[in-house]
């Protein structure tokens, strides 16, 4: 069965301050995200990624073009509340998103504001904490958690609202490598096990490998779109747009340039080793 579009951007243009003559942050971009999909959005600083996030949950509305969320137009004031329930955003800094001193109270904050019955709140808080693997910490004080744990609590608070889609806006930018891995694992699991539609905005190319599809933004326009493999095979385009390419992809690119016929779509270290060994065998080494 064809999955329906949960997010649809159609020729969206947006400028923060038109009167001041600033350049458009988005210059007419079109893309869709299907229900249940895991999309990764990459782009250098100022390319328009966070603007996409804010347009997707009606914090901003386009100057021209249309943003549809589950069929509802973000320009329609009567739909905006529903749109914000459908699409949530998790930001970079967990400290700005945590509001209570005890983990479970923090996660309960959103559902309480939805005026749900207490037993429903309890169920949602427990489910959300289990989903991000923080249930054992439910009675802990939030200030003594690590950055990665705090971010998982912030994610739990978001999914306790039961949005259909969550946009993660550089959720690992402030974390150490361990925290980054744990958050990426949590995001993957929410998508795979709970069918959450995910848009992951990141600077880290290797995080994009987990996604179904990748969109690369460059100065408010879509530069590349495709599977991680397809996108990473355009190493020269990525590098000239100021993005860090995974080491394996970079190595393949350099080998190719020097006449060694490595495949262009190698992503992991294992794949690199496999392709390289195959090449050596073919050449009688
Ligand atoms: N509140 C604002 N007022 C004016 N201009 C803004 C505002 N927010 C963003 N911009 C500008 O809009 C453009 C796109 O910004 P945006 O924050 O969407 O980029 P980004 O890809 O998220 O960047 P980063 O990687 O730094 O988070 C940039 O040129 C930025 O300077
Ligand atoms: Mg941003």
Image: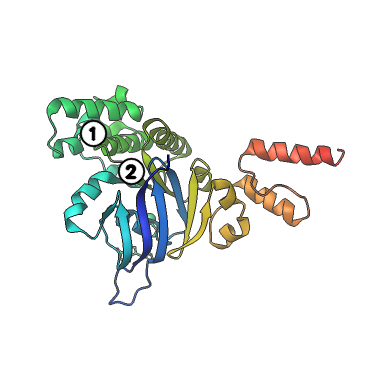
Front-lying residue, 211 or 95: 211
Image quadrant occupied by the C terminus: top right
What residue lies at 26% left-to-right and 37% top-to-bottom? 162
Mark 1 or mark 2, whichever is nearer to me: 2
Q: Crowdedness of circle 1 by 10 Å Cα count: few (<14), some, many (20+)?
A: many
Q: Is residue 13 above or below residue 113?
A: below
Q: Crowdedness of circle 2 by 10 Å Cα count: few (<14), some, many (20+)?
A: many
Q: Which mark is residue 107?
A: 1
Q: Earlier in the sequence, mark 1 or mark 2?
A: 1
Q: Is residue 251 above or below residue 27?
A: above
Residue 140 visible at all: no
Image quadrant occupied by the N terminus: top left
In space, the residues marked 1 and 2 are separated at their CA atoms by 18 Å
Q: Which residue carries the number 2 mark? A: 165
What residue lies at 29% left-to-right and 30% top-to-bottom? 128
Q: Which mark is residue 202?
A: none
Q: Is residue 79 left or right of residue 52?
A: left
What residue lies at 42% left-to-right and 33% top-to-bottom? 192
Mark 2 element type = strand
What residue lies at 42% left-to-right and 32% top-to-bottom? 189
Q: Residue extending furthest right?
A: 284
What is the x, y in percent for residue 244? 55, 53
Q: Is residue 20 left or right of residue 249?
A: left
What is the x, y in percent for residue 178? 46, 35
Front-lying residue, 25 or 33: 33
What is the x, y in percent for residue 257? 73, 57
Front-lying residue, 88 or 202: 88
């Amino acid at each position: 069965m064809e999955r329906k579009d949960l997010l649809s951007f159609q020729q969206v243009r947006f400028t923060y301050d038109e009167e001041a003559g600033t350049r458009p942050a988005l210059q007419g971009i079109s893309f869709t995200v299907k229900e249940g999909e895991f999309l990764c959005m990459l782009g250098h600083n100022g390319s328009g990624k966070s603007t996409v996030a804010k347009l997707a949950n009606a914090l901003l509305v386009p100057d021209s073009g249309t943003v549809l969320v589950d069929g509802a137009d973000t320009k329609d004031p009567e739909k905006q509340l529903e749109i914000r329930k459908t699409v949530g955003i998790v930001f970079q800094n967990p400290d700005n998103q945590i509001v209570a001193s005890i983990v479970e109270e923090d996660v309960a904050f959103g559902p309480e504001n939805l005026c749900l019955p207490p037993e429903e709140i309890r169920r949602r808080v427990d489910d959300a904490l289990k989903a991000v693997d923080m249930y054992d910490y439910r009675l802990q004080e939030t200030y003594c958690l690590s950055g990665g744990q705090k971010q998982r609590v912030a994610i739990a608070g978001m999914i306790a609202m039961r949005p259909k889609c969550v946009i993660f806006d550089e959720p690992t930018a402030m974390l150490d490598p361990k925290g980054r891995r744990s958050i990426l694992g949590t995001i993957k699991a929410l998508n795979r096990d709970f069918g959450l539609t995910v848009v992951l905005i990141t600077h880290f190319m290797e995080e994009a490998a987990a996604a179904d599809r990748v969109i690369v933004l460059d100065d408010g326009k879509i530069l590349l779109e495709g599977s991680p493999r397809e996108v990473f095979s355009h190493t020269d385009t990525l590098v000239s747009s100021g993005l860090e390419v995974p080491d394996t992809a970079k190595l393949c690119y350099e080998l190719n340039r020097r006449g060694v016929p490595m495949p262009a779509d190698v992503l992991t270290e294992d794949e690199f080793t496999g392709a390289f060994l195959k090449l050596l065998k073919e050449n009688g080494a």
